[in-house]
Amino acid sequence: MANSHLPDRDRLQALLLAYIEPARALGLAVEAASPAGVILTAPIAGNRNDKGTAFAGSLLSAAALAGWALVSCICAAESIDVEVALQASDARFLAPGRANLRAVARAPEEAALVKLKRMLTRGGRGRVEITVAVTSGDAEVMTFTGTYAVIVGGADPRRLLPIE
Amino acid sequence: MANSHLPDRDRLQALLLAYIEPARALGLAVEAASPAGVILTAPIAGNRNDKGTAFAGSLLSAAALAGWALVSCICAAESIDVEVALQASDARFLAPGRANLRAVARAPEEAALVKLKRMLTRGGRGRVEITVAVTSGDAEVMTFTGTYAVIVGGADPRRLLPIE
């Protein structure tokens, strides 16, 4: 996705459904999208495992996309046209999910954003860590940390991994 | 899933489609299933992202399930009736995936299996690390390490996390 325009909630929803093939099957919807944070939701129905609780892969998918969307929003707000790809992820599963899902990606601290912008403007590539919390009803069911590779312009960042 | 019977390839395929709701949407199929290893496949079609390459969430889902299935196979071969849940995961994305996907989970070394069996028979619960390599055509696109919680009997392991 080239981020020449700031993706608000409706635009991000349209992008997810148009370009992320599994998004529709997962039932993903955008609750909020700004450089301060992205919230994606998914129904528990269709995302259950053999235990009738949230499937780990669905939690990981929602978290990975929430982080990706947040990095896209952050760069778009700075008018930097980028491609973003997940380079690494680390997740902890905390409790079974029995209700609808909500993946909340919050902007990293200012120092990380300043560093990312400097890497992008000087070298045309950078990376940033985003933490995503996934809740199911009142329960926090997963914490996810994704390291996202960011490339200015149209190249696929994953062709250039790892970005140090 | 209660593992009173050794899940061969056809049985595992049926279990995935019956009990893992997103498995059908992902197009997951079982290529091999034994205590020595589990191989799951997924078509690239339906699993692409905005860059037209394999969606990280689909890679994570396939890997998480391959590891889960392998732990289930290992315990079934020992006639230990268990529930298995992913407790933590760590993934590295290596290259863009442009062809059909294959998630290969290999049995851990003997010492880890001996330790798992001892934990299960003595305390009724245990955990084990499984490494999964995901390829797309000739390219290795992701390495995944999952820590799986294992509980003897019918309890949901995720209700008891973390298992140390």
Image (cartoon, coloured by chain):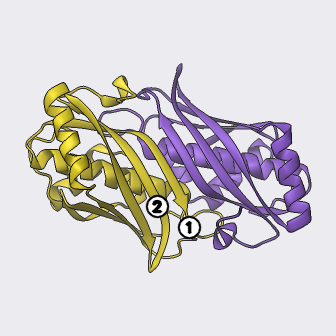
Chain colours: A yellow, B purple
Q: Secondary structure at mark 2?
A: strand
Disc 1 versus disc 2: distance between alpha carbons?
8 Å
| Disc 2 chain ID | A
Amino acid type at image mark 2: Thr
Eyeballing the image, is B27 above or below A53? above
Can residue A15 be seen here? The reply is no
**Circles 1 and 2 on the same subunit:** yes
Q: Nearer the viewer, residue B124 or B26?
A: B124
Q: Are marks 1 and 2 in contact (CB under 8 Å)?
A: yes
Nearest to N terminus: mark 1 or mark 2: 1
Quickly name the residue at label 2. A143
Residue B88 is tagged as none
| Disc 1 chain ID | A
Quadrant occupied by the N terminus of chain B:
bottom right
Q: Is A53 on the left or on the right of B92, as rendered?
A: right
Quadrant occupied by the C terminus of chain B:
bottom right
Using a 10 Å C-alpha cutoff, classify the residue at mark 2 as few (fewer than 14 neighbours), some (14 to 19) or many (20 or more): many
Can residue A44 be seen here? The reply is yes
Q: Position of residue B119 (x, y in %)?
A: 85, 59
Image point (77%, 52%), residue name = B72
Q: Nearer the viewer, residue B90 or A16?
A: B90
Image point (8%, 46%), residue name = A5
Instruction: Tell me where residue A28 sits by quadrant.
Output: bottom left
Image point (33%, 52%), residue name = A67
Quickly name the residue at label 1. A94
Q: Position of residue B31 (x, y in %)?
A: 69, 35
Furthest-front residue in this view: A111
Q: Secondary structure at mark 1?
A: loop
Instruction: Tell me where residue A156 sits by quadrant.
Output: top left
Image point (42%, 58%), residue name = A26
Amino acid type at image mark 1: Leu
